[in-house]
Amino acid sequence: MWYEEKIAEMKQRVFEANLALPRYGLVKLTWGNVSEIDRTLGVIVIKPSGIKYDEMQVEQMVVTDLSGNVLEDIHLRPSSDLPTHIVLYQSFGQIKSIVHTHSTHSVMWAQAGRDLPAYGTTHADTFYGKIPCTRQLTKEEVVEEYEAQTGHVIVETFRKRELNADEVPGVLVYGHGPFTWGDTPMKAVENSLVLDEICLMAKETEQINPDICDIPPYLLDKHYFRKHGKNAYYGQ
């Protein structure tokens, strides 16, 4: 009974977070997914593949083990992006939920193959420094286990750049789109929403001032650490 209750709670959280994506304007059609992991239970709960958001039911959230094997007989497939989520959960052991969307402004930067600079305090409140864009996947990586290789190129980017996944809870995959993560499904969605907004802000800022520079490190530090870490104190 305890196990079933925990699974039901996970399904509810994942369901509500998935429904938040279209409500916040982050997805069209079925272009997005949210998952949550419970490493103690050894399960991942994720959106089903191809189900329209306005038809989705909480009971349709798909439960898998940590290798992606479906554990319930509900005749639904997990999101095709599940292998990406699994690689990220394996590599970033502290994260508990992942969001992937094709939100307009984040995809603009991903398609441009550009890191997102930290131009202001709105960015710095959530992300500690620029948000990286991965390299382009090779033809071989796309042909062989594309979704898993997407996860591997994200992990490669963070390791090569020595980035902390807690401090930078998101990434742009070159030519593809954004992934974000957080302590809860709704926090991961919030990070996705912030990412899309600051992508728009950065694009418009560069149009207004093509010579704009990154936020000064002392202001980046102030805004990030007053909301994160042991000495955090800020809240609007």
Image (spheres, rainbow, N blue to C red):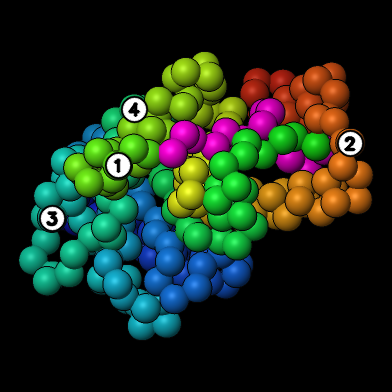
For discs 2 and 3, the disc positioned in front in the rendered view:
2
Residue 97 sits in which quadrant? top left
For discs 4 and 3, the disc positioned in front in the rendered view:
4
Q: CA distance from mark 4 to mark 3?
A: 21 Å
Please state the extent of the stretch shown in magenta in the rendering. 120-136
Residue at the far front: name it: 139
Seen at 56% across and 55% down, the residue is: 107
Total marks in image: 4
Which tag, 4 or 2, sits closer to the chain's start? Answer: 4
Label placed on residue 91: 4
Label placed on residue 211: 2
Residue at the far left: name it: 73
Find disc 1 in the rendering and name its residue: 139
For discs 4 and 2, the disc positioned in front in the rendered view:
2
Q: CA distance from mark 2 to mark 3?
A: 51 Å
Find disc 3 in the rendering and name its residue: 70
Residue 231 screen position, x and y as percent:
72, 21
